[in-house]
Amino acid sequence: MTLRWVSAGLGLLVLGLLILGAVTTSAQQTPPQPHQAAPSPQQVAAKPANIDRNGVLMLIRSTLLALDHANKTGNYTVLRDLGAPGFQVNTAAKLAEIFATQRGDKLDISGVAVIDPQLSLLPQIEPNGLLHMAGFFPSVPSQVNFELLFAPVEGQWRVIGVSLSVGQSSPVAPPAPEVPPGKAVVSQKQAAPPKPPLPSK
């Protein structure tokens, strides 16, 4: 009985070698074709948007002014209604909650109506079809930074994403270094102011 298992094992071994030889021969006769995988969404790059400067300004200003009005009035219905369907999943109450900090800070961004934005990300169409742009409005004492996403809806770009923050518009110097204790601070002595002349008698 042991011999049968061994012979059966040898038969399987020979059969395995024959199959391996056939596969090797087949592989030698036909070179393998390179596998071409479909490009993943990360590999597809964004492309520049075909939109002129005036169109960009209208999209940026109308969106940010709608947000400014909503923050000032506490009514986010119009902002919500101007958005794409993906933006409208947020209720007006949810938008009020999202922008509560800006509303509480009484942030006034009405200056975007007259100041030209500086774009840090030129308008581009993302692989998912959304129009994406970012930049800032330089102003004093702070600048308004924004990032916007728009979705195509019935031939129009409608907002689907808004990010807004306020930052410094000019470089800020670091705090002055502290003087270690025990070291004298050298300073120039200011001259005493001149004494007024005495009145003549």
Image (spheres, rainbow, N blue to C red):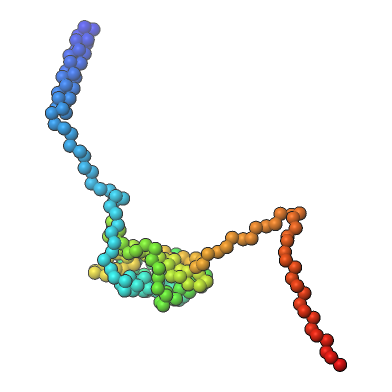
Q: Is residue 191 left or right of residue 153?
A: right
Image quadrant containing the N terminus: top left
**Residue at figure coordinates x 18%, y 34% from the top left:** 32
> Where does the image place residue 138, in percent across and percent down from the top left?
45, 70
**Residue at figure coordinates x 42%, y 75% from the top left:** 115
Q: How many marks?
A: 0
Residue 89 in view of the camera: no
> Where does the image place residue 179, in percent across and percent down from the top left?
70, 57
> Where does the image place residue 183, in percent across and percent down from the top left?
74, 55
Res 84 quadrant in image: bottom left
Q: Residue furthest front?
A: 200
Q: Nearer the viewer, residue 100 or 117?
A: 117
Q: Nearer the viewer, residue 100 or 56?
A: 56
**Residue at figure coordinates x 14%, y 25% from the top left:** 25
Res 111 quadrant in image: bottom left
Q: Is residue 14 above or below residue 124?
A: above
Image quadrant containing the C terminus: bottom right
Q: Is residue 16 above or below residue 44?
A: above
Res 54 quadrant in image: bottom left
> Where does the image place residue 79, in percent across and percent down from the top left?
37, 71
Residue 114 in view of the camera: yes
**Residue at figure coordinates x 38%, y 66% from the top left:** 119
